[in-house]
Amino acid sequence: ALAFWRVAIALPALATYAFFKTGRHPLADAAGHVDRRAVWMAVLAGVFFGVDLSLYHMSMSYTTAGNATLLSNCAPIFVALAAWMLFKERFGPVFIIGLFCAIGGAVVLSWAQRRMATGNVYGVDASGKSQTLLGDALAFGSAFFYAGYQLCIKRARRTLNTQTGMTLSMMASTVVIATIALIRGDAFLPSAWPGWMAILGLALLVQLGGQVVIVYAIGHLPVSFATVGLLAQPILVMVLGWVLLGESLSIWHGAGAAAVLLGIYLAQRGSNLRNTDPQPEVAT
């Protein structure tokens, strides 16, 4: 439900801006043509992003914000794998080393968090549920869908500007997230005003601020390079989680985080991805 409000509140403002910004049909390029494939790619990107956000938000009910953000940022690995399977890109042994390094780091992170929470490496809490393992799995799963989002939005940005691409994708995301929340039986309305303040912060600062500039950057940079730039997120979240939320950190958390970041970096270096897409044909 929190993920739903994040996109639902931001959507009207962005849609209005996209409509008046272009001065023409919002889906048309400078020549007045509508790239239907780009439109469908933007919608598909929204479906991927909706599942990604849902899994990411659910993961933080079971693991730390730092773990959730770090594991969800394994998207570059899936981007490289997709390029290999779909576009026949080749990668050498450096990619394989990076892949195993990132997976090993994720295992260390999960082990460290379960040990910190329960005092043993098997991590079963008082209610008898293996919380952290589920949370880490959800976060890692969200990385797969975030990779799909980045690949699709990259294709959409060939002819759609930032505002239009984001509006289409957010419309699809809103439907997907609302469906998942209804199936889960989530309560949609916060019980107190601090909840609304958090929702407004997510919608205006994170969704309108953060995601818009990410989509803008993806339109002008190789998608592989853009994903590496996002690796600053988990580091900041782990530090802020420790300062603001009182989440515990140990030397094992640092080692696992370093291994994941190094693995993602090596995977990118060894993937041989190039920016073969043309520059965007419309103003951003």
Image (cartoon, helix red, strand yellow):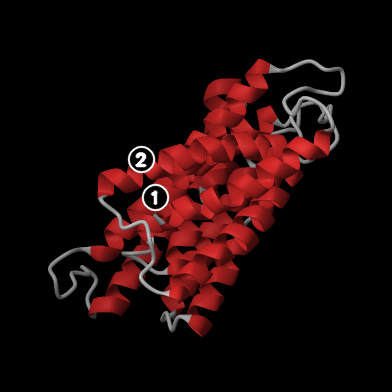
Q: Is residue 212 visible?
A: yes
> Residue 39 appears at what percent x and percent y?
64, 24
N-terminal label among 1 and 2: 1
Disc 2 residue type? Thr
Say what amino acid the circle numbered 1 marks. Leu
**Which mark, by number, is residue 55?**
1
Mark 1: which secondary structure?
helix
Q: Nearer the viewer, residue 109 or 174?
A: 174
Q: Residue at x 12, y 68 (%)?
A: 128
- Relative to residue 276, is residue 241 depicted above or below? below
Q: Position of residue 168 (x, y in %)?
A: 61, 34
Q: Is residue 90 left or right of residue 70?
A: right
Snapshot quadrant of residue 109? bottom left
- Whole-percent x, y for residue 280 in the image: 81, 30
- From the viewer's perspective, is 93 left or right of 115? right
Q: Pick out the residue farthest to the left.
A: 128
- Residue in the image at 81% along x and 23% along y: 29
* Residue 145 can be seen, yes or no: no
Alpha carbon separation for disc pair 1 and 2: 13 Å
Q: Mark 2 = which residue? A: 179
Residue drawn 52% across the image and 24% down it: 85
